[in-house]
Amino acid sequence: MQAAISRPTASFARFPNTASLTRRVSQFRKASCFSKKKTPTAIFRTRVADMSLSAAQAKDTCVLFDFDGTLGDTETPAMEVAYWELVPYFPNYQVSDVTEEFKAEFIRDSAGKAFEFMVEKCDKDRAQAGLPPIHEIRAAKGEDPEMLAFVDRYREKFGLQTFAQMRGPGGEEPADILTLQKDDTVLALETLAEACPGVKETLGKLEEMGVRFAIATTSGKPRVPVSVKASGLSVWFSPGKIHSGESDFDPPRFKPDPSVYLLAAESEAAKIEDCIAVEDSASGVGSASNAGVGMIVGYVGASHIKEAVIDSHAKMLMDGTKADNGIGADIVIEDFSDLLTLVSLFQEMDRARRPVPIPDEVVKSLKGRHWLRAPAMSP
């Protein structure tokens, strides 16, 4: 259900060019292409999506995308691999406790987080239960045999070596769970990674508009480049356009640390305030906010965000719990193509302040469900 939109009494002081945008909306409504069969909203949406930017505007604008759960519909398979890596080590967790509901909750809560943090949390839970850490259990091969046999059924589903194979004659098991998870995730995503709905069409349109874009992700390499290729996105993202908080820094700098956004902006020769971030996780929104991007667009159209939690997930993205200034996403969208309208709006904005209120005419033009952090602005 779409969030309610209230009408503020605020002026257009934050947007020196908002009046220009409003005039353009009025012009769109009076355009010769307008007919009784088309609504003003439909005309505005079409014209905003198709309008060309000036060379200066296009040069100034840069869109920085998270990857997992934003460009790539990869959170579900990646987090499912992580889940099955950790299941044998959840304290006091039996085969009978393994349910689809618990797995779905794990995937939703872990999306956007580095696997290192998941292992750290699991070890803390084990310590509180009086159990040794994961690395000691693995070294001693002290896992519950029934649980390992159960997990092996799902490892086979992803085309991964089973514990029985790795620990059997001629088998080889990575020494630590972090290496195992990274290798397994790359193998799984080589076949399971897909682009989120509307991503390819939107990237093509942004390219036509002359807007630069790049990837700013926590996830490591080669995982993301492999996923980019499997998703059919390599035409837009060469290796130089893929920036990783895990792989491009020593030691790694995971979101909500802002470093990967600052690196991506610098690599595109863009000022950070001229950048739009597109994110699906609280830590990613925090990273973008901490970096100082000009606008943050939350995205909830990937498969790991189920209908039952879509409203709460959108609210979480806007809450800004991982941002130092407490400012989260300015708007959350479900239809990826609505990003085009928001990029067009961004050309008209005073980029000195956030959060960004979205003009009412822009809100009305969005095709999919959306959630606003600040109320819509009325002319």
Image (cartoon, grey):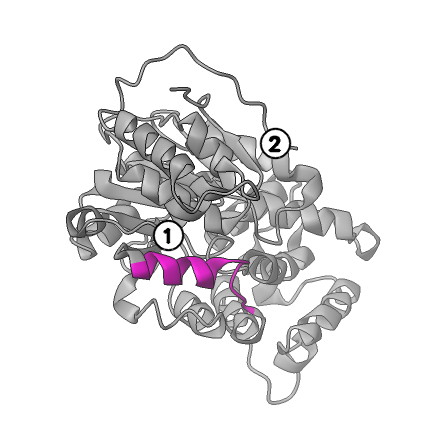
Q: CA distance from mark 1 to mark 2?
A: 25 Å
Q: Is residue 201 magenta?
A: yes
Say above or below: 103 vs 290.
Answer: below
Residue at the image position 31 percent from the left and 26 percent from the top: 354
Residue sitting nearer the eye, 327 or 133 = 327
Residue sitting nearer the eye, 351 or 162 = 351
- Taking the image as shown, residue 45 lies to the left or right of residue 36, namely left
Q: Quadrant of the image for the N terminus?
A: top right
Residue 211 place in picture, x, y as percent? 27, 54
CB-based contact (under 8 Å), mark 1 and mark 2: no
Q: Is residue 346 visible?
A: yes
**Residue stretch in magenta:** 193-208
Among numbered discs 1 and 2, the one appearing first in the sequence: 2
Say above or below: 243 vs 357.
Answer: below
Residue at the image position 70 percent from the left and 73 percent from the top: 157
> Which residue type does callout 2 highlight?
Gln
Q: Which residue corresponds to mark 2?
A: 2
Residue 91 place in picture, x, y as percent? 69, 47
The outermost residue toward the bottom is: 170
> Which residue type does callout 1 highlight?
Asp
Residue at the image position 44 percent from the left and 72 percent from the top: 226
Residue sitting nearer the eye, 158 or 375 = 375
Can you tell which mark lies on residue 50? 1
